[in-house]
């Protein structure tokens, strides 16, 4: 495998597609790995030998000794989660000194964001969004409102940050009391946390936009690591059951501060089936023994929340929408091994709505909740495939399944994953 130029790894479904494994795999062949959106609501898992790394903020490339890892300005940063991840890396023997940078323009998640997240979602009752309660949505809301926002750079101005935190907390507490009958958070504690956050982040903070631009000018190869998935994009996903940032390929330029034209290859990551965490429409969901079996075999529990994921058949109609939206060049198909043992596999090729076949993926939330999937059936395979070393060694039915998905998506499936380990990866096409 060889990566030429700059590459972006993006999720094509509702997140949890195993982007962490693909980012880790590509990191060996790149100079910088850049996380450009989301926050600690993301969960990227990397398995190396008998070690498992669960990362929420730090780019997955940190596990490799070579690349510089960058948390860009589009990320909302929880310093406490960041500090815990640093400690986990030390425990695992991973060196990160001088290999990790944080944007001074990233926005900071405070405990009052997490409280607001939980209070608001609980108040919605049956219409709750199923938030991770990590404070991501409220932090992005404050970012858009501007007057309530705190960026990393603000932490290093002690003459103003104390007043700013106290002003924001006073406002938030009035809001919490009026809307949710909550006492809110302690003003002195939040002011103290702001000071502590500055010390946690101080060794890593820089102008990452300039850093990335200088790296590109110097001929360095950049790998951009997406979080969540395209169908969770705040503008282009299954709104309102989405995340609070642009989780599609559309978000990389704004989140990282680089021109879109510098990315030469977009690699979309999709599971060989479909999962979703929390509420929201899921046309191919199998809330039955089939879904239970996929969940058990795939260990489908959220990296961030631990919640069981909803499971169902591969949705080629939705995934093709993501491929086209992101200008995806190649696809990495993950967790194919989970489907071993099924007599029959189903693939959704279209949706119908009120008896008519839809020509395009519905971005109208009310329509999306009422669509019916159109399935085609494929023979399964009995063999366990986690030890397979090449695509040609897969059972014929597994090869045919991958090729059919390739036809439906309209782009090459360059990578097929048959297990969580780095070595359990089958390369079918040049990733250039």
Image (cartoon, grey):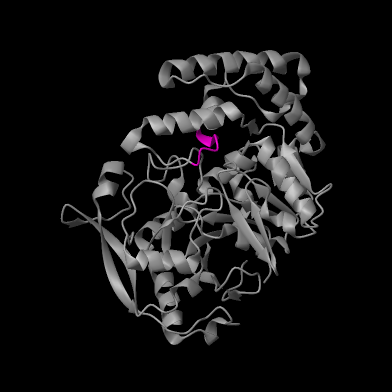
Above or below, comparing residue 15 to residue 243 in the picture: below
Q: Nearer the viewer, residue 6 or 353?
A: 353
Is the stretch drawn in magenta largely helix, strand or loop? Answer: loop
In percent of width and height, residue 206 lies at 77, 36
In percent of width and height, residue 395 lies at 47, 86
State the extent of the magenta-drawn residues as a range: 132-137
**Residue at left offset 42%, top offset 67%:** 294
In percent of width and height, residue 119 lies at 45, 29
Q: Nearer the viewer, residue 344 or 149?
A: 344
Q: Is residue 133 shown in magenta?
A: yes
Q: Determine which quarter of the picture holds residue 358.
A: bottom left
Left/right of residue 425 with respect to residue 394 in the rendered view: right
**Residue at left offset 75%, top offset 28%:** 196
Q: Is residue 263 visible?
A: yes
Q: Is residue 313 shown in magenta?
A: no
Give the position of the N terminus as an image quadrant: bottom right
In percent of width and height, residue 359 lies at 27, 56
């Amino acid at each position: 495998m060889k990566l030429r130029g700059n590459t972006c790894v993006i999720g094509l479904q509702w997140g949890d597609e195993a982007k962490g494994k693909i980012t880790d795999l590509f990191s060996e062949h790149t100079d910088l790995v850049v996380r450009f959106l989301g926050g600690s609501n993301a969960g990227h898992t990397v398995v190396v030998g008998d070690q498992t790394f669960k990362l929420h903020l730090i780019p997955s490339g940190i596990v490799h000794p070579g690349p510089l890892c960058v948390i860009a300005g589009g990320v909302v940063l929880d310093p406490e989660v960041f500090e815990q991840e640093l400690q986990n890396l030390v425990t695992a023997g991973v060196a990160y000194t001088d290999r990790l940078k944080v944007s001074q323009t990233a926005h900071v998640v405070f405990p009052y964001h997490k409280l607001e997240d939980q209070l608001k979602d609980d108040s919605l009752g049956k219409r709750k969004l199923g938030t991770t309660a990590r404070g991501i949505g409220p932090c992005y809301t404050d970012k858009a409102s501007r007057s309530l926002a705190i960026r990393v750079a603000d932490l290093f101005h002690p003459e103003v940050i104390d007043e700013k935190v106290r002003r924001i907390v006073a406002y938030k507490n009035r809001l919490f009391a009026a809307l949710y009958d909550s006492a809110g958070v302690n003003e002195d504690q939040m002011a103290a946390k702001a000071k502590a956050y500055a010390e946690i982040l101080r060794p890593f903070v820089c102008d990452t936009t300039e850093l990335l631009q200088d790296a590109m000018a110097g001929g360095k190869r950049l790998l951009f690591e997406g979080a969540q998935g395209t169908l969770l994009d705040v503008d282009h996903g299954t709104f309102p059951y989405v995340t609070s940032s642009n989780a599609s390929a559309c978000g990389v330029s704004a989140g990282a501060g680089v021109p879109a034209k510098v990315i030469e290859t977009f690699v979309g990551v999709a599971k060989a089936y479909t999962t979703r965490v929390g509420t929201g429409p899921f046309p191919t969901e199998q809330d039955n023994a089939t879904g239970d079996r996929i969940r058990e075999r795939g260990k489908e529990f959220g990296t961030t929340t631990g919640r069981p994921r909803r499971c169902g058949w591969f949705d080629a109609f939705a995934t093709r929408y993501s491929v086209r939206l992101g200008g995806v060049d190649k696809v990495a198909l993950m967790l194919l091994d989970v489907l071993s043992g099924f007599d029959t596999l189903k693939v959704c090729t279209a949706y119908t709505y009120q008896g008519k076949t839809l020509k395009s993926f519905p971005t109208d939330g009310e329509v999306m909740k009422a669509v019916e999937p159109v399935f085609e059936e494929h023979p399964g395979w009995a063999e366990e495939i986690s030890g397979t070393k090449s695509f040609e060694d897969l059972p014929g039915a597994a090869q045919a399944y991958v090729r059919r998905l390739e036809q439906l998506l309209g782009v090459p499936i360059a990578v097929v994953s048959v297990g969580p380990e780095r070595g359990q990866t089958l390369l079918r096409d040049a990733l250039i």
